[in-house]
Amino acid sequence: MPALEERDVTGRIAGSFRDPSGYVFIHRGRIFRAIDAECRDTLRHLADSGVLPRLMRSGAVVETRFVEDRAMLAELEEAHGARGAFLEHDRLAHITYPYEWSLSMVADAGIHTLDLQMALVEAGCSLKDATAYNVQFVNGAPRFIDLPSFERASRLDVWYALGQFQRMFVYPLLLGRYQGWDPRSYFLANLDGRSASQVAGSFRGLQAYRPGLLLDVTLPAFFERRSANGDAKVTQKNAGSPSAAAQIPNLKRLRNKLKALAAGYKPTEAWVAYTRECSYDDTAESAKKRQIAAFLDRIAPASVLDLGANTGDYSYVAASCGADVVAVDQSHDTIEVLYRRLRQEPARITPVVVDLRSPSPGIGYRNEERPPFFERISTDCVMALALIHHLIVSGNMTLDAVRELFAGVVRRHLILEFVPPDDEMFRRLTQFRRDEFGYLTLEKCIEAFSPAFQLEAKAPLPHSGRTLLLFRRKDS
């Protein structure tokens, strides 16, 4: 298994996937991209016009520099072959993929792509592809990472990547808003999204003629069928037209559409209300937040992985203590709520939808193009608050399996909340189960974690029967 440091800015194995216009690799622990002459000239044009510096200053595009140092250029050319030029990218702390996003994250990534396309068109350029995998989230905000997607446009009145944009952004949002799909079910099975005909098949009868579908699904599906039958005739008009007048209104229409689709989605999953319904009272909850903050101040982690984060209350506690946080929950709707909160209350939190019982697998070429979730994430501290009983009861894991799950991703510390079987929320979880969980005591939990972790502190939570445990990896 390649080490985390060997992976590039997009999460792919360095050097394994070489786009002729620009591939990414790691050299001396830094992230470089080799680009061809055409890409170099496009980026120089955008830099000289001021568009690229403005996009980087605003955080819209990953910070990137041309490699100018002659000694470094010679070193890179010797190691990777003579190219048109080399770029150096800032390293991103976390890599996530669209099948780990909530619907509003998909929408904002799409809106970000449209805004970027409109900015490029003004400079006589365009995005030659519009895949969702070209966007990452940094501190809860989208950022574009694939600069070789920029090209000098042969036509400004049309966007050749529009079909891909529909598959990557419009269709998952339509299916999520009206058919209950989540991004995981859409993207994992369809790396390039679904066609208009496939999406149209999900809407029956008069549904296909609702205004929100007619222009982006029903009519494109009709023309797809005609093209497949050889009935469509392709004509080109205004070839080489310099005018963007035909493109911009449609981009603005799509922007409004994505925004409305995301805003119209109403989170309903039961776990969204968990924070209000959990079995500890206000005193216990306040004590829990104070104690977690005290643990975090004591260990001062640079990064925290909050597993079972729910709507992110404790992710915010970790972020306020100076940590860079990845907030993980299996519930799409809780991550949707957390992401909407991040829009209003920005913090160093990256929310992701991941089921720990079945985490994101490796997909793409040889299952290596986009690595599994736990190969992309490594952290100083794991927080697992009121989680292990869910993994044991719903995930059928043993305590030993839970220990190995956490030990496989954490470098130093683990903050664990132990919930006893007589806890109200534990009883709700097991009310239809015949299994006996009386063996699950605090002492057994500490014992089960002892092969990998040393207990440093424990703090009972008042009026709850729950206990917070601070562990340190024995080999750290």
Image: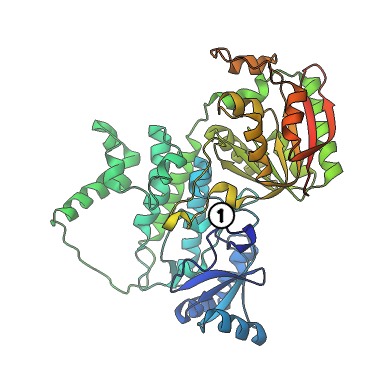
Hey, what amino acid is under mark 1? Answer: Gln
Image location (x, y in percent) of residue 435: 58, 15
As helix, strand or loop, the secondary structure at mark 1 comes to: strand
Q: Quadrant of the N terminus?
A: bottom right
Is residue 214 at least partly visible in the picture?
Answer: no
Closer to us: 442 or 309 = 442
Q: At x 67% / y 68%, what residue is drawn?
A: 29
Looking at the image, residue 103 lies above or below residue 285: below
Is residue 149 at least partly visible in the picture?
Answer: yes
Q: At x 55% / y 66%, what residue is drawn?
A: 14
Q: Which residue is mark 1?
A: 136
Looking at the image, residue 260 lies above or below residue 90: above
Image location (x, y in percent) of residue 62: 60, 63
Quadrant for residue 153, please give it: bottom left
Closer to us: 249 or 148 = 148
Image location (x, y in percent) of residue 41: 49, 80
Quadrant for residue 57, please give it: bottom right
Quadrant for residue 298, please give it: top right
Image location (x, y in percent) of residue 400: 66, 33
